[in-house]
Image (tube, rainbow, N blue to C red):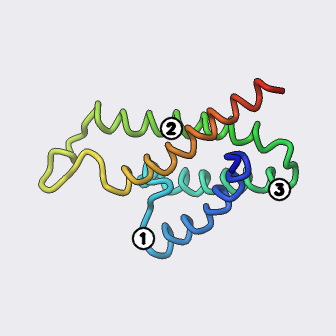
Amino acid sequence: MNVIRILPWYYAATAVFLLLDYFAGVNVRVAFLESLPGARAAYYAVCFTCLALMIWRPSWTILIATFESLVTIVALILSMGIRVMVPTDAIFGENASFITYQEIINFLISGSMAYLSWIQGLKALQSR
């Protein structure tokens, strides 16, 4: 199955992640933005915008997914790297951890899809 065909479904799944985040309190899609509710809402809006653009212009799917995947990869690397490399005082408190399980799940889900999207997107763009 072509990964490019999976991408709109991945962005459509953002609705499920949004419901889990705001109504069930389980934030696995944008755990790296947990402390920034405005940025978290903006990230969901960007994902829905990507989906709308992919539905409106299917020929743009590769370009949209490739660009968004680059942004996601950079955001994940920075958010995880900063948390590990620059610890704050709160981390050294009792029962605190450097990274939560939600952030790890977010990193795996988002990172895997972003990496696949990035690689497939570059291949598709080079073949044009």
Question: Going by the image, does 93 lie left or right of 98?
Answer: left
Q: Mark 1 points at which residue?
A: 25
Asked if labels 2 and 3 touch by Cβ distance under 8 angstroms, the answer is no
* The quadrant where residue 123 appears: top right
Question: Going by the image, does 87 lie left or right of 63?
Answer: left
Cα distance between the residues tagged 1 and 2:
22 Å
Among the two numbered marks 1 and 2 on one chain, the one whose residue lies closer to the N terminus: 1
Tell us which disc is closer to us: 1 or 3: 3
Q: Which amino acid does label 2 sit on?
A: Ala
Residue 58 x, y percent position in the rendering:
85, 49
Tell us which disc is closer to us: 3 or 2: 3
Q: What residue type is labelled 1?
A: Gly
Residue 109 x, y percent position in the rendering:
48, 51
Q: Categorize mark 3 by other alpha carbons within 10 Å: few (<14), some (14-19), many (20+).
A: few
Residue 41 x, y percent position in the rendering:
58, 57
Residue 59 x, y percent position in the rendering:
86, 43
Question: Going by the image, does 110 lie left or right of 42?
Answer: left
Q: Mark 2 points at which residue?
A: 75
Q: Residue at x 70, y 34 (%)?
A: 121
Secondary structure beneath dot 2 equals: helix
Q: Which amino acid does label 3 sit on?
A: Ile
Q: Residue at x 75, y 32 (%)?
A: 124
* The quadrant where residue 55 appears: bottom right
Q: Which of 36 and 5 is in front in this view?
A: 5
Secondary structure beneath dot 1 equals: loop
Q: Residue at x 67, y 46 (%)?
A: 3
Among the two numbered marks 3 and 2 on one chain, the one whose residue lies closer to the N terminus: 3
Cα distance between the residues tagged 1 and 3:
29 Å
Q: Name the residue under label 3.
A: 55
- Image label count: 3
Cα distance between the residues tagged 3 and 2:
25 Å
Among the two numbered marks 1 and 3 on one chain, the one whose residue lies closer to the N terminus: 1
